[in-house]
């Protein structure tokens, strides 16, 4: 499977839309995190949220209590480390650079959900996934078209297999969407409740690390734990 995936990536062209030359060109003026940034064009600014992918979370001032309690929690440490690395990658690659934007949708926060292309026609989402700095957001992948889906899924498979970036420590990997749900549970609990919850969640990830269960089963058990709390 790994060889087939590698051959697919090598033989598929760098994906870009047929209407690339007609996409509007914007300048990135601020980077919020790995998958969200501010762009400007002709005096107009808008916030972009990258389509199809999710980068790890970064620390938030509003969550100081639970982040302090979890200061030695590997799940939190891993999430924030790769959240910071994804933000740094976006900062170095995009800030003050021009990009081309293909808007897919507008979300409830009034952000433009978009494909973002560098001027060499590289899709920025692919670069994040390839380096293990983003996971594919499968919940929203259906709105993309087939060649792009193949590139995203295959590049994520190779990053996982090669233990790139975010995937380097299986015992600490909680997908960003799951991590946000985990934090919402922590916000409802007192300090002792958080510590008790973490014992159960750590047991799931230990089973995953020991290869006693699959990623799919680990996510199912984590979903169940969060839903029951």
Image (cartoon, helix red, strand yellow):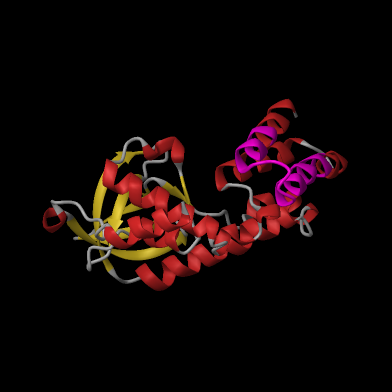
Q: Residue at x 29, y 70 (%)?
A: 97
Placement of the C terminus among the 4 image quadrants: top right
Q: Position of residue 89 (x, y in %)?
A: 45, 68
Is 209 within the magenta? Answer: yes
Residue 150 x/y as whole percent: 34, 47
**Where is residue 170 drawn, in percent x and y?**
66, 54
Q: Which residue is pictured at 50% across the width and 60% down the height?
A: 132
Q: Is residue 30 left or right of residue 147?
A: right
Say if 181 sits above or below 206 in the image: above
Which quadrant would residue 124 be assigned to in this image?
A: bottom left
Is residue 60 left or right of 198 when viewed as pictured? left
Numbered marks: total = 0
Residue at image position (11%, 54%) is 22
Of 48 and 227, nearer the camera is 227
Q: 121 or 48: which is nearer to us? A: 121
> Can residue 113 be seen in the rendering of this structure?
no
Give the dominant element type of the magenta stretch: helix, strand or loop.
Answer: helix
Specify the segment rendered in magenta: 197-221
Up-down: is 63 above or below 82?
above
**Residue 38: quadrant of the picture:** bottom left
The residue drawn where x is 32% and y is 64% is: 28
């Amino acid at each position: 499977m790994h060889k087939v995936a590698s051959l697919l990536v090598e033989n598929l062209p760098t994906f870009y839309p047929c209407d690339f030359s007609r996409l509007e060109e914007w300048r990135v003026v601020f980077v919020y995190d790995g998958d969200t940034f501010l762009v400007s064009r002709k005096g107009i600014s808008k916030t972009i949220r990258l389509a199809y992918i999710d980068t790890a979370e970064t620390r938030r001032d509003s969550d100081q209590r639970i982040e302090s309690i979890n200061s030695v929690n590997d799940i939190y440490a891993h999430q924030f480390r790769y959240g910071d690395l994804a933000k740094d990658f976006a900062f170095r690659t995009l800030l003050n650079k021009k990009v081309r934007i293909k808007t897919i949708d507008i979300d409830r926060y009034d952000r433009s959900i978009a494909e973002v292309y560098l001027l060499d026609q590289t899709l920025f989402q692919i670069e994040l996934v390839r380096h293990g700095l983003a996971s594919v957001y499968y919940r929203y992948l259906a709105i993309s078209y087939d060649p792009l889906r193949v590139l995203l899924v295959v590049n994520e498979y190779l990053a996982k297999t090669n233990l790139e970036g975010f995937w380097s420590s299986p015992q600490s990997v909680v997908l960003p969407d799951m991590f946000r749900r985990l934090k919402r549970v922590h916000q409802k609990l007192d300090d002792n409740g958080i510590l008790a919850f973490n014992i159960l969640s750590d047991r799931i990830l230990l089973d995953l690390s020991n290869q006693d269960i699959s990623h799919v089963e680990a996510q199912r058990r984590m979903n169940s734990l969060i839903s029951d709390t």
